[in-house]
Amino acid sequence: MSYSLLDFLCLLGSVALFLYGMKVMSEGLQKAAGDRLRSILSVMTRNRLTGMLTGILITALIQSSSASTVMVVSFVNAGLMTLGQSMAVIFGANVGTTFTAWIIALFGFKVDTSLMILPIIACSVPLLFSSSSKKKSIGEFLVGFAFMFMGLGMISTYVPDLQSNPEMFAFLEKYASMGFLSVLIFLFVGMILTAIIQSSAATFAIVLIMCTKGWITFDIACAVVLGSNIGTTVTPLLASMSGNVAAKRTAMGHLLFNTFGLVWTLVVFYPFCDLNVWITERLGQGNPTEIFTFVNALEASDPDTYNALFANTLPSGHPVLAQVAQMQFSVSFGLSMFHTVFNLVNVAIMIWLTGLYVKIVEALVPKRHKEDDEFQLKFISGGLMSASELNIAQAEKEILVYSQRVQRMVGMAQAIVKVKDQEEFTRQFSRLEKYEEISDRMEIEIAHYLNRCAEGRLSNEGKHRISALIRITSEIESVADCCYGIGKIMVRKNESHADFNEEIHHNIDSMFIAVEAAITNENLLLRDLENISEADIITSYNREREINNMRNQLRSANVENINEHHYEYQAGIYYMDIIGSLEKVGDYVINVVDEIKTLLRTPRE
């Protein structure tokens, strides 16, 4: 039997279908329960045990430890959890990823999935055309589930039959008969394979099929599965590259956790494999090591039956079929057991050493100097996007930081009004101008990030939330423009040699105080968009009315003051320009509050 380029492309297509099914299934779940997942993730790390259990739950739901770990990296980057809290979630994620292995083991071989795939698709496709976004998301989940097992079945068909290709078999035999060195070689193969296809579950599926067909021994298959635990850390490492120091430490912690497990397992590799064989036998699932010997003996003693077996031409009642089927399930059960026991032992050891583990990670990834972060966004970056629904939380944290930075510009504008020394004025105006440039860049980067989130698969609630956040970002930038505008008014005022008296300074300070109070209340609302206070919203509207009333009073008094020669007409013009700019700030603040208010009535289906 020759293995053609077309067969190889079919194998790649099968793996791609398997991965695509997992992706669609994961995204369907995230769309159906994205907001709830975000709520869970924000409160799940009160202690190590709850953090670990949540890591298990989330990973079991979305079927990917890489995806859940990227989420953890994102939330550490967003300041929603500490490094120590994230470690517990990562420990749990490694246990949760074994859930996928058990699904494949228990359903992929014991149940004829081909009988399930088409009925599942038949039931799920009508849901895709539903007017309810939640039903659509459930339909996507079911379609993804069907595609995943369809890909699994095709992988079984198109994986090359190495025993029918002597030259390839000789090549593998050369490396499979080198004792412990073979374990290291195939461990490296599992590491590279998983790093490339970005899924330990896909690697597990491929190895499971190869092992059950008798192409590699059980211990070599265990080595590949062990290597896949290291390969799966590549995605979080990539995601953290452009994140902050906490995100890099979280990704490094994931790598070190799996590396530690790899080291202790290699020290006791053969006894550990024997332990899992013993557990499998004690649970009544047979000896997973027997299939390799059985298949090779069958080829030597009865080549015709062997060829008919793998050509799927044996009659349904043939005794060899029943034997091989039982042995196949034994291997799948044994590999799942190996994967589970490895991660459980690893977690049982490491969960008690979290504090020490955090110190090691902090030493390996030292903190950068403060000036390194001066022009960088604090919570969001241009790294890999994990889950659009969950990335919204990062943007919300960044928008709060943005608003707080712009509030500092209000204080700078207030200070610059009082400066009389020209050299000091130039210095403070340059600082205000620099902040305005940073504000423009922040608006662009936050809006770009939100647009990237919007390109993902979102629920109606997520789409509505992103639209509101983009408008909020634009309004905050307008506040920064007003502050810079006050600086430019003062430049013109100084050039015309106009002078503000104490009355003007007092009235401008009063207006600044009212505007500062309005922005402070806005930031109070932005701090917790999941629990918006109606009382704070009412306070914001009251603040805006105070600003408008003050503007009207000062405008009326200005005409009288000029007529009574309290100050020059030119000074009164610049004075009113500043008051008008501050009133506009109040308008922009209430526009932000209006957008926040819409989140109270976000549509849910």
Image (spheres, helix red, strand yellow):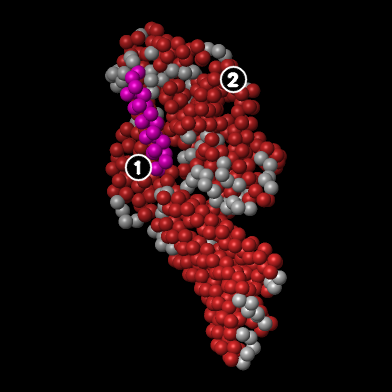
The residue indicated by pointer 1 is 143
Q: Earlier in the sequence, mark 2 or mark 1?
A: 1
Residue under the point 49% across and 52% down: 449
Q: Is residue 280 visible?
A: no
Above or below: residue 418 compared with residue 181: below
Looking at the image, residue 492 sits to the left or right of residue 331; the answer is right
**Looking at the picture, which amino acid does disc 2 mark?**
Tyr
Q: Which residues are the magenta region?
A: 3-25
Name the spot of residue 91 as percent of width and height, x first. Answer: 59, 39
Tell me the crowding category of disc 1: few under 14, some 14 to 19, or many 20 or more residues within 10 angstroms, Cα based. many
The residue indicated by pointer 2 is 270
Residue under the point 36% across and 31% down: 13
As helix, strand or loop, the secondary structure at mark 1 comes to: helix
As helix, strand or loop, the secondary structure at mark 2 comes to: helix
Q: CA distance from mark 2 to mark 1?
A: 40 Å
Name the spot of residue 395 as percent of width and height, x first. Answer: 52, 55
Q: Residue furthest front?
A: 496
